Amino acid sequence: MGKEAVFTMKLEAELRDAFMKEAEASHRPASQIVRELMRDFVKAQTEKREYEVWLDAELDKAIAHADDPNTKWYTQEEAMADMERQRQSLLERLAAQRAAEDSAEPNAAE
């Protein structure tokens, strides 16, 4: 643990009293709860910033890909037809797998 520092802040008396009451009820020092809240806030903000950096990089890649003259573009109809072909292929494979399992069951019982 690094050097400790004092943190002073102003807040409404009602909020302070309610916080101290809840801290006491949880059998934890108020300062420990505040440190945890601060750590959680720092972590959330860091993760948010890291996500935004990642998202910006992904968007830059997508834009570069879209601008590439070698990029193959598909219409929505082509994409939907391809998805349907993939769906049908999967259903056929599942049916074949079930049929193979069903035909193997009597042999297993012997």
Image (cartoon, rainbow, N blue to C red):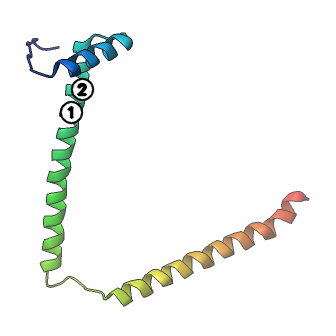
List x then y, in percent, for residue 91: 60, 76
Residue at 84% over, 59% down = 108
Q: In the figure, 105 relative to 63: above or below? A: above
- Residue 78 seen by the camera: yes
Q: In the figure, 8 relative to 57: above or below? A: above
For residue 57, which numbered disc appears in the image? none
Q: Is residue 44 left or right of residue 25?
A: left
- Residue 32 seen by the camera: no
Q: Which amino acid does label 2 sit on?
A: Leu
Quarter of the image for residue 58 reads bottom left
**Camera-side residue: 86 or 48?**
48
Residue under numbered circle 1: 41
Mark 1 vs 2: CB contact within 8 A: yes
Residue at 8% over, 13% down = 5
Q: Which amino acid does label 1 sit on?
A: Phe
List x then y, in percent, for residue 9: 9, 20
Residue under numbered circle 2: 37
Number of residue marks: 2
Q: What element carries label 2?
A: helix
Query: In what quadrant of the picture does the C terminus appear?
Result: bottom right
List x then y, in percent, for residue 69: 14, 85
Around disc 1, counting alpha carbons within 10 Å, would you say few (fewer than 14), some (14 to 19), or many (20 or more)?
A: few
Q: What element carries label 1?
A: helix
Specify the farthest residue to the right. Answer: 110
List x then y, in percent, for residue 30: 25, 13
Residue at 17% over, 18% down = 13
**Camera-side residue: 95 or 81?**
81
